[in-house]
Amino acid sequence: MDKERIDQIIAKYQGDASYLIQVLLEIQSENHWLPKEALERISEKLNVPLTRIQHIATFYKAFSLVPKGRHQIHICMGTACHVRGAPRLLDTVQDLTGIKPGETDLDLKFSLETVNCLGCCALGPVMEIDGKPHGKMVPAETADVLKSYE
Ligand code: FES
């Protein structure tokens, strides 16, 4: 994310420090994580100490200080999904993306996490990508779904 874009986002909130969280949320949603340079720029422009920004960025789960992919994959390992084949789904996704839960691939395309229930157990095994659930996943279909993401 370039400096100009960061400045544009900060400018939208008229450099008002009370919008710190909104600025962080906007950068997170556009860039998928918060690089150190972005935090330094915000600190400078909003006149907020870097330590305070860092504190907020580590406190809220919505923010990431490490690189994240453009697409977030969540695989449900809850009981209902587990009995319907979630471990096999996880293996397939790991093979196709080359990453394990908690990791991001080198092209910053996908980040992978496991979760305990996505609230749509009847569709198990479920894989959610960017908040969209994909249910009853079998390996061939999983590959097709992953291929549809740029
Ligand atoms: S257990 Fe997977 S959606 Fe509920």
Image (cartoon, rainbow, N blue to C red):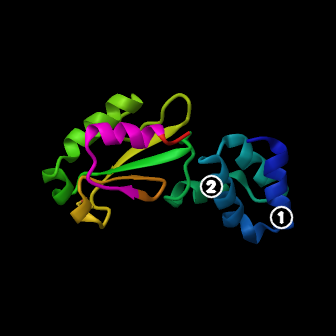
Q: 127 or 144: nearer the eye?
A: 144
Please say whether residue 51 is visible from this viewpoint. no
Q: 31 or 15: nearer the eye?
A: 31
Circle 2: element type: helix
Amino acid residing under circle 1: Lys
Residue at the location (80% across, 48% down)?
5
Q: Quadrant of the N terminus?
A: top right
Amino acid residing under circle 2: Ser
Q: Quadrant of the C terminus?
A: top right
Give the numbered dot on residue 29.
2
- Which segment is the magenta one? 133-147
Q: Residue 128: horizontal and vertical position, in percent?
A: 39, 54
In this image, 1 relative to 25: left or right? right
Helix, strand or loop: magenta stretch:
helix
Q: Residue 80: horizontal and vertical position, in percent?
A: 17, 59
Q: Which residue is mark 1?
A: 12
Please say whether residue 1 is visible from this viewpoint. yes
